[in-house]
Amino acid sequence: MPQTVEFSVFRGSSSGDIVPGTIRRDLKPTEVFLDISHAGLCGTDRLFKEKEVVLGHEGAGTVRDIGSAVTHLKPGDRVGFGWVQKVCGHCDYCLSVSTAASSGKLMKTGKDQYCDHRKQYGSDFEIGSFATHAVFDISMLIKLPDELELEYAAPLMCGGATVWEALTSYDAQPGDRVAIQGIGGLGHLAIQFASALGYEVVALSSSPQKKDEAIGLGAKEFHVLKNGIPETSMAKVKHLFWILSFVANGGVVYPLTISSQSLQIPVLALDANGIRVQGSAVASRLAIRKMLRFVVVHRLRPIIMSWPMTKDGIQAAFKTLEDGKMRYRGVLVSQRYLMGKPVVEKMK
């Protein structure tokens, strides 16, 4: 007989209000029951605020119980989760092999975030990170390094994974000039990662006051943008996140902003200068594991602001994000974690 668990969640609503609720769910053989300690607040979460889905898609916590078929995690293990919630493990993308453009060598890449049968956040309205607990399929849970604090792990599972994938999975090489446009939730992580990877980092921002912080995070240059154009002269870059006119011949543009709007792309400029536009979404399980190890070895951490995981706390975090005052990733912290006490949920 399957085990049944019950836990508290925070949903969106048609009015945009945050609605507390309760979920009762059976634990399937390949699923894991998690105590969620921390949840990251991502810009994408604003798109779901008016839907009746459990909010939040990145987080970290501790395994509370496991299904009968789960073998490589146990109660007490610390894990993280992100945008992709389940993959099949046997399609071409889960088992992919590709040819590296720079070397011509065959490399196992494992792009399982593009799995033909993947389940992403929003496909199951009962799974989200703004909750006391969650039931997740084992396939996309990532065991966390012991040295990485849970509050920093949570915002890395989507935000960190997104920039890590773009910086490491395509053609960027140590010594390349890489420009990061925008020093926010993704940008401040991209600067740290790119610098530690050995790239020559150029930070671009419309906020002059962010210069010292950008340099402190690892940028070699800082340029203020006015109407999308740097106010000071700068050499062209090989990789950019996103101003086409400043991309070197043969360079790559990575548009990482989640938007339903269409891009206006000057095809002649792309063709004449051999410039590529490379889409990228979060990262595979293997890439996320590598990112987490890299963060530990290089002692990198996101800059976070924290709120309690309550209705008022979630609303305050959203307001800070929407007002453009987030510095730089929002993290919601569970009440039991703040109190240092476990909660008792009904289990049958």
Image (cartoon, rainbow, N blue to C red):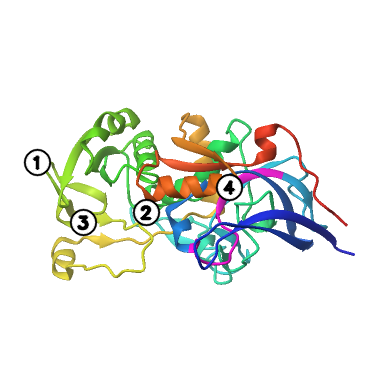
**In this orientation, does residue 205 appear?**
yes
Rendered view: 30 above or below 344: below
Disc 1 marks which residue?
A: 233
CA gap between label 4 and label 1 equals: 40 Å
Q: Residue at x 26, y 50 (%)?
A: 240
Residue 59 is labelled as 4
Instruction: Name the amino acid, label 3.
Output: Gly
Using a 10 Å C-alpha cutoff, classify the residue at mark 3 as few (fewer than 14 neighbours), some (14 to 19) or many (20 or more): some
Give left or right: position of 88 versus 288: right
Image point 54% across, 68% down: which residue?
92
Foreground mark, 4 or 1?
4
Q: Which residue is mark 2?
A: 170
Q: Position of residue 174 (x, y in %)?
A: 32, 39
Distance CA(mark 4)–CA(mark 3):
37 Å
**Percent from the top left, x then y, of residue 315?**
50, 49
Q: Which residues are magenta?
A: 48-62
For the N terminus, the quadrant is: bottom right
Sooner in the amino-acid sequence: mark 3 or mark 2: 2
Gap between marks 4 and 2 measured at Cα: 26 Å
Q: Amino acid at mark 2?
A: Tyr
SS state under label 4: strand
- Give the alpha-carbon distance from disc 1 to disc 3, as whole Å: 20 Å
Question: Label 1 vs label 2: CA separation?
Answer: 27 Å
